[in-house]
């Protein structure tokens, strides 16, 4: 994924950087399909709390997840900056609601540091690493893991944590 | 010649399976009518081709075995031995062996199974009838000598008559192999094979067996029934190497006489071989496409269907805003035309995914035969409408339910011959399996003229099982009682004959059928008949749905589960133990507010105006909704990741305005509702 090899170990990473609450997060660009404005979302009764519903993306039904809710950072307020980042993870397409998409960043993999054990309430297991760019701390999310937990433990774990 | 076995193996398997089907079909016909010369001809041909192709791929023991079957059939064909039940049984068994060998080959082996016992039986059958053959020998020899080109036997004239009736051509093809031809049989065989692409070769001079043993000089004559022209036939034969002096002549000389004969003989004569000829033509005109590719096409068309709906709406909006303008009118025209084209495209694509139900019906005659022998019952099995087409995904699923229903009918529906006689019915029971298309649905019926269902016994049983409360039970009419048989566990444990044997796993049949968006119903008259009617949509991907409003949200209810809609009148809905109920066809049904089940935001702020009666797996339920929008054709799309595990929906669809509406799956919704103890159902 995005491994433009510079040397054997160090490679370039390209991130889509976005804001949730007051933190900066990044998702590797290779898994991002597109970034769209928020649109009419159809609610799905009985879906997990963080699932806002589904949208019609050029004829495809795409579930929309509020990342703030997913990480228990409250609910995303809808503003003109609110965006949906459509990502593809292991063949599944999901849209993430985020507060604001700031930029696309390139940096070398060796500037990536291992994640701290707890970061703003987000479990370290969803974090691939933390990068320091221009005095900002950017948390690189591992999208596959965000949903892996779902698959295995199911929604129970989540409900228990509430 | 080098043959890469692996490359040809799959072709061989596919072709042989087709031949096995043909073999079985003809054998069943022959059993019914031992004088059916077309059937034995077709049997012989199937065995012959299997023998040839298995030998050429090196499956020697299979080739040897089919050879001995073929020689047995040859004796029958030439009246050297009489066709009796023993021989029919040997042929059935032989068919099973071939099937087994083919399975073995498919698994990567050589088809070397143990044929010895059957080969022994064949030899015995041959010798036991030797006396018959001796007495006939003299006339046989005579016949061979007198057999000139114009001398055709009954079967052959039959084929020709039929061909003329159907407007097909009959050609006599004379050709020679070139001097010094090294491989006479392979060349002759190649000519035969290529001609079979065009039609049916029904006679060769010398006989196929002689050609095989290269018992001929260089000249050959083939007779063909075909749709193709003289020219086309000639070209095909000439295209084969080492073939010279090709002469193709229409078989005209005695044509008028044939027509006369045919008219006298009746047109219905031997329909089956007619179908056979037709099937051969079809073969050369088809290509194989992977199902995946068709699925992709289907998805793309689904997109177009959605766009069409949207475009029509946009066009209407524009027209409203800018009526009178010329370009608006042409926009409307183009939109309408495109909509129509997309409709046609959709139909065509749907059609490519359709298979005739004969794909599943084919195996039933054998099943019925074997079962009826086993049960000592006499069955007249009538199949009709095999050519009716259904979506492949439905075809793939309905085999088992049908087997189930057929078994039921044979086992418990149709009585033993003595019992039938005592009742004044014909000893032979009748089982009818039919398929037909009806207004966007395919209807499959299975009907027997057996015992029928006894409503009183069902009522008794339902009481014992405590399935429905006794006072409701007493009010139920026969039809409602029959419906009980589809309930899970209605009569699985007991000896089934108690309720005329129905009910075994009928719940399973029902759930499979409903999963395919179909429905199943049952009607019966005691002592007369039982009939199951299965109804399927032509395709799975697009369904008819009732769009309803729950507050501001729109949901789609598949029309096949909607029994009735009505305006909600307060006095009709009563409250029993805090559960809302209403009467529907004499039955007390719970009324559920969809807004409650779906926890619709603001549900306190709107009222429900309509009731929708829907069927679920075990009981009908009434849903209350705020509004009805109407019926619409909707394309089912899978709900994405995570959401697809939410119970109560089997997908979503895109509405004309581009919004998404969820398609309600009443069965899983009700089970989810029950699990959560939302309400008590029933």
Image: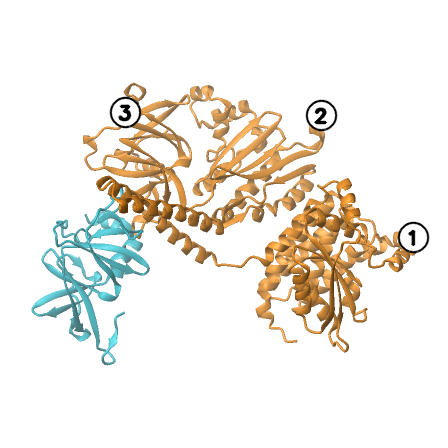
**Left or right: where does residue B409 sit relative to residue A137?**
right
Question: Which residue is identified by label 2?
Answer: B422
- Judging from the image, what secondary structure is the residue with disc 2 in? helix
Q: Give the x, y percent position of residue B545.
A: 37, 38
**Marks 2 and 1: which is nearer the front?**
1
Residue drawn where x is 41% and y is 52% of the image? B298
Contact flag, marks 2 and 1 (Cβ < 8 Å): no
Residue toward you, B674 or B451: B451
Q: Quadrant of the N terminus of chain A?
A: bottom left
The image shows residue A18, relative to residue B214, as above or below, that is above
Residue drawn where x is 25% and y is 38% of the image? B553
N-terminal of the pair, mark 1 or mark 3, is: 1
- Judging from the image, what secondary structure is the residue with disc 3 in? loop
Q: Give the x, y percent position of residue B39.
A: 72, 49
Question: Which residue is identified by label 1?
Answer: B135
How many neighbours does mark 1 have within 10 angstroms: few (below 14), some (14-19), or many (20 or more)? few
**Left or right: where does residue B10 sit relative to residue B643?**
right
State the hue of chain B: orange
Confirm whether circles 2 and 3 share one chain. yes
**Left or right: where does residue B122 sit relative to residue B398?**
right
Residue drawn where x is 11% and y is 60% of the image? A23
State the hue of chain A: cyan
- Is residue B114 among the parts visible in the rendering? no
N-terminal of the pair, mark 2 or mark 3, is: 2
How many neighbours does mark 3 have within 10 angstroms: few (below 14), some (14-19), or many (20 or more)? few
Q: Quadrant of residue B524?
A: top right
Residue toward you, B7 or A75: B7
Q: Give the x, y percent position of residue A117.
A: 16, 63
Q: Which chain contains the residue that carries disc 1? A: B
Contact flag, marks 2 and 3 (Cβ < 8 Å): no
Question: Which residue is identified by label 3?
Answer: B578
């Amino acid at each position: 994924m995005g491994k433009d090899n510079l040397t054997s170990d160090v490679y370039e990473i390209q991130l889509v950087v976005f804001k949730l609450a007051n933190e900066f997060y990044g998702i590797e660009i290779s898994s991002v399909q597109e970034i769209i404005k928020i649109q009419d979302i159809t609610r799905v009764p009985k879906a997990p709390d963080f699932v806002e519903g589904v949208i019609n993306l050029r004829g495809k039904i795409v579930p929309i997840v509020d990342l703030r809710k997913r990480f228990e950072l409250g609910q995303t307020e809808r503003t003109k900056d609110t965006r949906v980042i459509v990502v593809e993870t292991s063949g599944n397409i999901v849209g993430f609601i985020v507060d604001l998409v700031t930029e696309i960043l390139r940096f070398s993999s060796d500037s990536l540091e291992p994640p701290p054990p707890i970061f703003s309430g987000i479990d370290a297991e969803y974090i691939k690493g933390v990068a320091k760019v221009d005095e900002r701390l950017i948390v690189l999310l591992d999208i596959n893991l965000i949903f892996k937990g779902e698959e295995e433990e199911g929604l129970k774990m989540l409900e228990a944590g509430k | 010649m080098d043959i890469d076995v692996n490359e040809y193996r799959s072709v061989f398997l596919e072709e042989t399976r087709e031949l096995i089907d043909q073999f079985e079909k003809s054998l069943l016909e022959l059993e019914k009518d031992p004088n059916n010369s077309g059937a034995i001809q077709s049997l012989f041909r199937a065995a012959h081709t299997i023998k040839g192709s298995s030998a050429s791929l090196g499956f020697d023991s299979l080739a040897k075995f089919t050879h001995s079957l073929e020689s047995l059939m040859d004796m029958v064909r030439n009246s050297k031995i009489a066709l009796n039940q023993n021989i029919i049984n040997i042929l059935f068994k032989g068919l099973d062996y071939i099937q087994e060998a083919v399975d073995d080959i498919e698994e990567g082996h050589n088809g070397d199974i143990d044929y010895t016992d059957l080969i022994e039986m064949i030899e015995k059958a041959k010798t036991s009838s030797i006396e018959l053959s001796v007495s006939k020998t003299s006339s046989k020899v005579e016949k061979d000598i007198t057999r000139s080109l114009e001398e055709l036997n009954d079967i052959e004239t039959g084929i020709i008559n039929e061909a003329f009736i159907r407007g097909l051509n009959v050609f006599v093809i004379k050709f020679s192999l070139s001097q010094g031809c090294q491989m006479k049989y392979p060349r002759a065989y190649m000519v035969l094979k290529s001609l079979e692409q065009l039609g049916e070769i029904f006679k060769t001079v010398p006989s196929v067996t002689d050609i095989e043993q290269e018992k001929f000089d260089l000249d050959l004559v083939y007779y063909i029934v075909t749709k193709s022209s003289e020219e086309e036939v000639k070209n095909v034969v000439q295209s084969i190497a080492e073939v010279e002096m090709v002469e193709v002549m229409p078989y005209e000389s005695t044509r008028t006489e044939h027509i006369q004969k045919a008219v006298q003989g009746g047109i219905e004569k031997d329909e089956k071989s007619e179908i056979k000829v037709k099937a051969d033509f079809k073969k050369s005109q088809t290509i194989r496409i992977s199902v995946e590719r068709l699925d992709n096409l289907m998805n793309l068309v689904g997109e177009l269907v959605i766009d069409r709906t949207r475009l029509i709406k946009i066009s209407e909006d524009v027209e409203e805003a800018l009526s009178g303008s010329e370009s608006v009118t042409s926009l409307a025209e183009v939109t309408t035309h495109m909509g129509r084209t997309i409709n046609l495209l959709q139909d065509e694509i749907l059609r490519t995914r359709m298979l005739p139900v004969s794909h599943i019906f084919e195996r039933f005659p054998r099943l019925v035969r074997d079962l009826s022998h086993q049960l000592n019952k006499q069955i007249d099995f009538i199949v009709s409408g095999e050519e009716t087409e259904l979506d492949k995904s439905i075809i793939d699923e309905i085999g088992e339910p049908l087997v189930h229903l057929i078994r039921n009918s044979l086992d418990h529906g149709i009585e033993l011959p003595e019992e039938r006689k005592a009742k004044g019915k014909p000893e032979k029971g009748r089982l009818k399996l039919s398929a037909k298309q009806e207004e966007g649905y395919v209807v499959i019926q299975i009907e027997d003229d057996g015992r029928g269902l006894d409503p009183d016994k069902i009522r008794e049983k339902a009481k014992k099982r405590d399935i429905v409360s006794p006072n409701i039970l007493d009010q139920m009419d026969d039809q409602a009682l029959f419906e009980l048989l589809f309930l899970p566990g209605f009569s699985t444990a007991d000896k089934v004959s108690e309720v005329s044997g129905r009910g075994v796993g009928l719940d399973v049949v029902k759930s499979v059928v409903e999963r395919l968006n179909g429905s199943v119903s049952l009607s019966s008259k005691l002592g007369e008949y039982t009939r199951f009617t299965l109804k399927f949509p032509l395709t799975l991907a697009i369904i008819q749905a009732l769009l309803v409003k729950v507050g501001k949200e729109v949901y789609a209810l598949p029309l096949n589960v909607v029994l009735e809609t009505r305006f909600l009148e307060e006095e009709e809905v009563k409250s029993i133990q805090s559960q809302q109920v209403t009467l529907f066809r004499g039955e007390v049904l719970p009324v559920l507010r969809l807004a409650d089940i779906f926890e619709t935001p603001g549900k306190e702020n709107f009222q429900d105006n309509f009731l929708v009666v829907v069927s679920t797996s075990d009981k009908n339920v009434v849903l209350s909704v705020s509004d009805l929008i109407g019926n619409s054709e909707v394309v089912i799309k899978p709900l994405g990741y995570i959401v697809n595990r939410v119970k109560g929906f089997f997908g979503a669809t895109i509405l004309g305005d581009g919004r998404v509406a969820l398609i309600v799956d009443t069965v899983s919704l009700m089970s989810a509702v029950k699990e959560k103890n939302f309400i008590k159902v029933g």
